[in-house]
Image: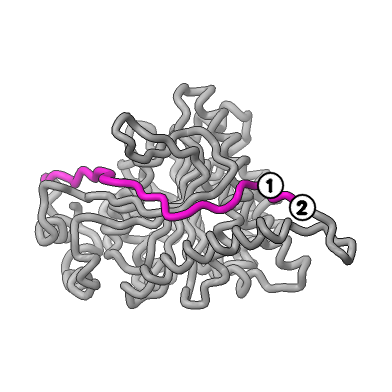
Amino acid sequence: MPASYYSGGNAGRYEGLAPQLQTTQVDLLYVTDRQPERDGEGRLHYGVDRSQSLAFGSVIVDIDENRSWEELVAWTQSEDTDDPAPTPEVLSVTELGRLPDTPFPRVVDDFGHIVNRPEVEAEHARARDIALDDLRRRLALTERKVVWLSVHGVQVGFDEGAQIIALGWHKRGRWGVPIYYSWPAGQSGFISGYSYDRESGEFTIYHLKQLLRALGRVTEIDKINVIAHSRGTDVLISAVRELFIEARAAGFDPRTQYNIGHLVLIAPDMDVEVSTQRIIAEGLGQGVEHLTIYVSEQDWAIALAQSMFSSKRRIGQMNAGDLTDDHKRLLRKAGNADIIFYKGSAGGTFGHSYYDTPEILSDLFMLGEGHKAGAEHGRPLEPVAPHMWIIQDGYAP
């Protein structure tokens, strides 16, 4: 890999892992509202159809069957760009439980209140607690009691997303517990596929809220960091926004209710003008410890979405010149938000996959470690203006 935080002084990071984690295979906790399917041999898969219920389980991803654990760690810490990258493969998917279908049936109680049917509520609590017990088991394997919840974007199948999350977690040092949230995306077709996936993103919001509510109940978690990519950013923001409104209406502080540390949006497929109302006006930043947004003006996938929806500008393709004085004033006033402009050459054919570059992963690592932006804090990003930064190829904190 290119030079990054993986080399040098971080060589001992993998040595401190629990023995169960020192393997090329990653046991990834997944949560999904994709419809389950079986192949010809009876093996479980998840497709693009929508399920009315939320399932959870374990997906085993082999990072690279051709490397031993020691060889995989050596690759991660190597600066040899000619060393072939791993080829992750999903080995198995095991569903451990499933919540009841939504919407829950409701009744009027003795006090005239509309409530969920008690038997359905009990089944929901039983299934939820099975999932949370499995999460606690995973937390016990790591010194850092931090959850990394990842939400993918459009045109991503279940297996592909699992491979990306597993490899990214390995590259970051395998600390904390990764949770893979997979919604019904990946429909074929350019326009029709994007349209289906976009509506699936609306469909999944309630289920994602179920997950975030459940995670907020786990006192063993020190902090929940949430990362979303592409259209997944709008899915995440919509769910978080609704939960925060709900919490504030009930007189609770969202920061203690949902325990979100870092809210990270990568290549957001969201309109800038809409987002000023959905994110800033709704006060989402006041409900999390820190908001970080990674954007790239070379992201042509976002440019296509911008054209389709006649947006003046999508967040994911912004450059520093797009921010008005009012935007900059709001950033300064918030104090806990940063916009990072990726100026590198990676990102695939459409420049949309730069989340997987060593530079972005390095910065995410340092962010998760508690380092603020700026060279004086160990993150040598190039300052543009207060809370606005540039990250280039070769960035190595």
| Residue 136 visible to an observer of this rendering | yes
Front residue of this view, candidates 385 and 116? 116
Q: Check the image and report above or below for 333 versus 119.
A: below
Q: From which residue to which does the magenta span run?
A: 82-106
Observer-nearest residue: 322 or 221?
A: 221
Q: What residue type is labelled 2?
A: Arg
SS type, badge 2? strand
User: Left or right of 177: which side holds 324?
Assistant: right
Q: Quadrant of residue 136?
A: bottom left
Q: Can residue 298 be seen in this view?
A: no
**Place of residue 97 in the rendered image (x, y in percent of width and height, measured from the top left):** 47, 54
Q: Label 1, on which residue? A: 103
* Residue depicted at 29% across the width and 33% down the height: 41
- What residue do we see at 23% from left, 55% from top? 25
* Residue 305 x/y as whole percent: 54, 31
- Whether residue 145 appears in magenta in the rendering, the answer is no
Instruction: State left or right for residue 170 relative to residue 350.
Output: left
| Residue type (three-letter) at the residue carrying disc 1 | Pro
Please report the residue visible at 18 percent of the width from the left and 52 percent of the height from the top: 1
Residue plotted at (77% across, 69% down): 250
- Give the residue number, with chain letter if any, for mark 2: 106
Q: Residue furthest right?
A: 112
In the picture, the quarter occupied by the C terminus is bottom left
- The color scheme shown is one colour
Distance between mark 1 and mark 2 Cα atoms: 9 Å
Disc 2 residue crowd, few under 14, some 14–19, many 20+, Cα 10 Å: some
**1 and 2 marks in contact (CB < 8 Å):** yes
Q: Which of marks 1 and 2 is in front?
A: 2
Q: What element carries label 1?
A: loop
Question: Up-down: is 131 above or below 303?
Answer: below
Q: Where is residue 209 in the image (x, y as percent from the top left)?
A: 61, 55
